[in-house]
Amino acid sequence: MVATETFIGQPVLRKEDGDLLTGQARFIDNFTMPGMLWMAMVRPPYVHATINSVDTSAAASMPGVVGVYTGKDLSLGALPFVWPITEDIKIPVHYPLATDKIRFAGDAVAVVLAETREQAEDAAEMVSIEASELKAVTDLREAAKDEVIIHDDLGTNVVVHWSHGGAGDQDIFESAPVIVQETYDQPRLIPNAMEPRGCLAYGVGAMDEWTLVSATQIPHIAKVTLAGVMGIEEPKFRVIAPDVGGGFGSKLNVYAEEALACALAKRSGRPVKWIEGRQENYVATIHGRGVTHDCTLAGTEDGMILGVKFVELADMGAYFQLLTPGIPELGAWVYMGPYRPETYWYEFRGIVTNCTPTDAYRGAGRPEATYVLERLVDAFARKIGKDPAAVRRMNFHPPFDEATTSICGLNVDSGNYEPLLDKALELSAYDEVRKEQQARRDRGDTKQLGIGLSTYIEMCGLAPSNILGALRYAAGGWDGATIECTPGGGVIVKTGTSPHGQGHETSWSQIVADGLGVDPDKVEVLHGDTAITPLGMDTYGSRSLSVGGVALHFAMEKIKEKARTIAAHELEVSEDDLEWADGSYRVKGAPDKARTIPDLAVSAWHAHDLPAGVEPHLNATAVYDPPNFTWPSGAHIAVVEVDTETGATDIIKYIAVDDCGTVINPMIVEGQVHGGVAQGVAEALYEEAIYDEGGNLTTSSMTQYLVPTAVEIPAIITDNSQETPSTTNPLGVKGIGEAGTIASPPAVINAVVDALSHLGVTEVGKPASPERVWRAIQDARGGAA
Ligand code: MCN
């Protein structure tokens, strides 16, 4: 009993790590079953082609092969897509196997079942595809011209147009004293979870009961949507997410392979397993970003931002995955950042290309928006010759602690932005770095210093179901939690969130420990199995704490209500005579007369003497639908050294000051920021999916796609000491899982441009590779690159 100790706010070591670090965790590839078959996908040697025939005979006769199936053999329904964001959206129908046309390099045309993985993969290579090759379009501007149509039935590649804005006087974009216009491209990124995807499907055919074990972030959503595709009665379908080695949004999806494994388990009557290869992952798992923005900022000479306008083209890829066109829309709500422009406009067009579908990748829409806004603010500061920190400061929204409607139309829960910038400036020793920068410029040093700022707000904690409904999203945004207090003094928590690296077992235990006055080690958190934790909406959108964690809070309230009734009965006082103090119900004025939750769990379990009307067992379930999103904010600063001879960039200092409301576990929060910043630094300096003219992905393995190692990632100084509580939930928490990824790309690129601005460089592109930076320097010098 640790009643007086408080766990919220403490850096409690992660419970999950013991198993993860000692090889005891169970990832999908650790699962095996008697009679299990292996599945391999037959991916085409084409990018865009009309299928004439698929010959499976040679593959079918290979050793160990149980069957080879095309789309026509299986006749499955289309894969789930749940976010038709406009009424007139054109939906490119996406079947698990292509039958008429191949539309991107990962577009499988057949699937092989064999006794071993090697046999399945060898046989997949023997499937012969005869197809008439078509011109491929991988560039979204080219695709938007509709010279090559990818889905003939749609008649265009421009499948959706969404606009939201028009707030304020739009004439300002013509008439303001200062107009800044920039175009920013953000290339596609390839998610690299440590564990690629994989799944295992099995069932009891006679009962029509099926189970899918999958490396997924969304067992609950997968269950509902896949049951529909598979024609399985939903109660007879169970989805399990075992230990999952990261997702970063890429496993917030329902993929062809999951549907096919289920279909083939049904067809063969044997368990079917599939594990994705890393190169396969690069073409078959969703990509992120892939957008271009035309941006306009209207301002005054002294630095006030009057209006911001963004017109975006977003690469959807060859099909929609679960959420594809909804991703740019998720960014729509943060284009004003922490500032208060009088006027705002945002619109985007979703373009189909011959590339892997895009979908949620850490930040999902919000990094894209924050990148262009923060780049634009720097361009504005440069144009009017002002310090970028000063321009930000004069434009910040004043502090507010009640939900306030932003110019983008949603209520922001709370915010206090200026102190975050002050803290970041202090931690970066801003004034000294500026002096050193000037000294290097004066000396004409080869290595120049740059300082990049990024002040952001984020919309996360997805989300109020009614708003999601208004945005035409098909599911809700609630989450559930069940608590069971056992007679042995333990507490079992069943959460609807599905962590895959975020440490929910630890932070949920901290919440329960404080709420119920028990030791966090006595709390067992179960998750990721629809049969054990049926009520949930899973983990993405930095929602888990501010929705699932809050559901847990409300379940605790119910537990305490029941416990109080039992305590009053046992202590022979009225409930009003009890107070909750030091982790127990005690009689006011007689602290020795007390009952703890474990005491009351025993009473509720043996049920020998319960008050009338009270059910045995101390358990409760709560389902929570948040009334608002949560809106974290922060200020990040990167200090870089750019070698003007080679174009190489070194980040020599990185400061991340983030306000995510009440912090449950500062160590986990710091870890989330570290991971997020690492991803953002990768985006800024290294990672980019590149296609050749024929539409083939040339960055098709880790030797060409530059995932940085720990060596390239700078030491990150974090500060989460400012806690502006969310007004949305009783815990006051806001999300943190994506903040680092949202804030860091513009901080780094602004720093690189800042290092070179005295040479006349205004843009380096993303990622700011040495070659791009070197060319930008040559261009600015007027020399031939
Ligand atoms: N936390 C806290 N106090 C706060 C906010 C959060 O202690 N004020 C803790 C939470 O209790 C939780 C963690 O920080 O343990 C993250 O919480 P939250 O911000 O609610 O985010 P989610 O748990 O919903 O995680 C999703 C988010 C997203 S969207 C991506 S993408 C992402 C990320 O988390 N992918 C990750 N972090 C990742 N971390 C790992 N290791 N692997 C991934 O794939």
Image (cartoon, rainbow, N blue to C red):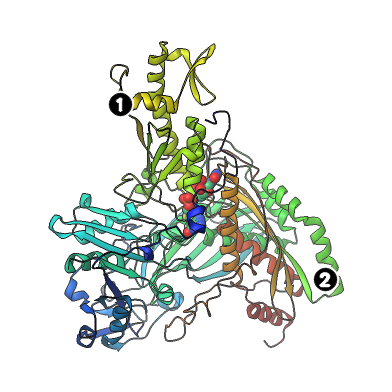
Residue 174 in view of the camera: no
Query: According to the image, label 1 marks what residue?
Result: 616
Of the 4 image quadrants, the one containing the C terminus is: bottom right
Q: In this view, does 686 lie above or below 654?
A: below
- Amino acid type shown at disc 1: Pro
Determine whether, in the image, residue 546 is placed left or right of residue 81: right
Q: Which of 477 and 600 is in front in this view?
A: 600
| Position in image of residue 406 (x %, y %) | 53, 45
Comparing marks 2 and 1, which lies closer to the viewer?
1
Q: Is residue 672 above or below residue 315?
A: above
Query: According to the image, label 2 marks what residue?
Result: 441
SS class of the residue under badge 2? helix
Quarter-of-image position of residue 617? top left
Beta carbon at label 1 within 8 Å of ligand 1: no
Quarter-of-image position of residue 385? bottom right
| Position in image of residue 248 (x %, y %) | 47, 60
| Position in image of residue 231 (x %, y %) | 18, 59
**Looking at the image, is mark 2 or mark 1 earlier in the sequence?**
2
| Position in image of residue 599 (x %, y %) | 42, 25
Q: Nearer the viewer, residue 5 or 641?
A: 5
